[in-house]
Each structure stands twice: as structure tokens, then as C-alpha cells.
Amino acid sequence: MLNIGCHLSISKGYENMGLTALEIGANTFQFFTRNPRGGGAKALDMEDVKKLNDIYEDKNFATLLAHAPYTINPASKTDKTRDFALMAMSEDIERLDLLPNNYYNFHPGSHVGQGTEKGIKLIVEILNQVMKEDMKTTMLLETMAGKGTEIGRSFEELRAIIDGVEIKSKIGVCLDTCHVYDAGYDIVNNLDGVLEEFDKIVGIDRLKAIHLNDSKNPFKSHKDRHEKIGEGSIGLKAFERIINHPQLKHLPFYLETPNELDGYKREIELLRGLND
Ligand code: FE
Ligand code: FE
Ligand code: ZN
């Protein structure tokens, strides 16, 4: 069975996301650990969390995906911004222990002119401070489109981060289809070749989750604008190959397409229909 869901708003709580997922035919979902643009996280309502845990168990959900806020930048050149990343990630990791089985996805960071090497060093420093042997979640580096000074635009950059991480059993990758296509990995015409390259550089067993997004922009545009499934430059045929690929089909897939709930419901139906 295809494990698929979409990004859901956390504003009405955890149980609400579980119920919403069921309504749209999803068996997993992604959510922001806190307001994606602001700072603070609300105290966990454990009653609410328990209700989501029950749904997760009863309905056999696949691993949930917690997404770190966009405001964190572990590769920043200001101490204050890096301190915020450290604080927010530590706090998120603690909270994620209490939620149903999940991965913790984050954008590696932007080096803001310091250079990729320096940026990677700063990211690694923070990861080694926030990661704990006994944490339940696994950290996922998201593959990035490479706009501005984003780190994570190539498999080599992801590999360099992983190399620096001490707790290797708790670090993986979330591949975003829009981002890798924009970054210059041709998942449309050469999916096998891209996965082979990923395996050679990062190791395919590090790949834990897929963000399924079409792209508004052409191949290698380094833009990062998501499009609805089948309506962008990646196209439906490529998504059919992705969800059925022997190296990918067991992974959880999360839509981050520009949709309201009804649109997500249609995309989930569409993709389930294409699942072998
Ligand atoms: Fe993301
Ligand atoms: Fe993404
Ligand atoms: Zn994106």
C-alpha cells in the first residue's frame, strides 16, 4: 500500500490533523513543529496528543513527518540566529519523543556568503549539540533547490553534513522532488541514474521520506516553486514512476503542493490509483 499524506495545519491540534488525514484518504501527514515564521512553541496538550496516538495506532498510520520552522538557520553567521536554531531544534526533539512515531525534517541552512564549507561546519556543530543517543526521532536533511546560498543543493553537500554527524544512526535524508529537479537532478528522464548517484554518494538506506511536489519552473532553475501534481515541469508520468520505484515505493510520501484539502484529497486519490 502507498503510504501517502500531505502537509496539514497544526492550528487545530494533533487529533484534528489525524482526523483530517483520514478524511482525505491519507495514512500519514506532515506538520510544522511550531509557527513556521514565528518563534515559540505552545506547551503540548497531552490529551490531544493521546487522541492522535490512538488514531495512529488504530488506523496503522505510516511515520509522521515533523517539519522544522523555516526561520531556523543553523548555518547563519550571527550567533543569535544559530542560538535560536539550537534552542528550537533541541526543544522540538524533546517534544517529538511524545508524539507518534515521526521523522524531523529540516532545511540544512543558508551560508549567507560564508561559503559552503563554513556553512556545513556550522550545521554539523549544531546537529552534534542537539542530537541525543536516546532520542526517538531521526533527523532528516531536506534536499534543497539551491536558491540563494542554500546548503543541501547536491548529494555531496548532504554527504558532507552526514560525515560530520556523530550519531549516525539518527540522521537521514528527505528527498523533495521539486527541489532536486530544480537543483539539476533529472528525475524525469533518468530516475534510475539519480537514485544510483544518491546511493553512491549518500547511501540509499539514508533515504527515509519523499516530498512529492511538481515544479513551476524548468529543470535546473534553482527556484523552488511547488506546483500541483501533474501540472508542472515534472509531470504525472514521472510521479507514477517515483511512487512505484522499487527503491522508493516503501517510503512515506508527503504532498506539499499548492492545494486546499479538497485538492490534496484528489491528488492522494490520483496517486493511489497509479500505485501498482
Ligand atoms: Fe521543506
Ligand atoms: Fe519540501
Ligand atoms: Zn520547497
Image (spheres, rainbow, N blue to C red):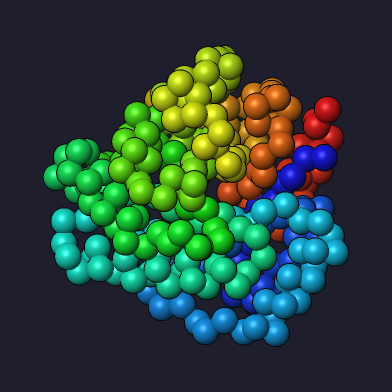
Up the image or down, 7 lies above or below 225; here it is: below
- Rendered image quadrant of residue 39: bottom left
Q: Residue placed farthest to the front in the image? A: 133
- Rendered image quadrant of residue 141: top left
Q: Position of residue 249 (x, y in %)?
A: 71, 32
Residue at 34% across, 71% down: 87
Residue at 24% across, 63% down: 82
Please tell me how many numbered marks the rendered image carries: 0
Q: Answer left or right for 123 relative to 271.
A: left
Residue at 63% across, 47% down: 254
Residue situated in front as seen by the camera: 258 or 268: 268
- Rendered image quadrant of residue 220: top left
Q: Answer left or right for 82 relative to 22.
A: left
Q: Position of residue 200 (x, y in %)?
A: 46, 21
Q: Position of residue 37 (x, y in %)?
A: 40, 67
Q: Answer left or right for 67 relative to 46.
A: left
Q: Which quadrant is the C terminus positioned in? A: top right
Residue 73 appears in the picture as rendered: no
Residue 62 appears in the picture as rendered: yes
Residue at 47% across, 66% down: 93
Residue situated in front as seen by the camera: 37 or 205: 205
Residue situated in front as seen by the camera: 11 or 45: 45
Q: Answer left or right for 69 relative to 215.
A: left
Q: Which quadrant is the N terminus positioned in? A: top right
Q: Position of residue 52 (x, y in %)?
A: 73, 71
Up the image or down, 70 lies above or below 223; here it is: below
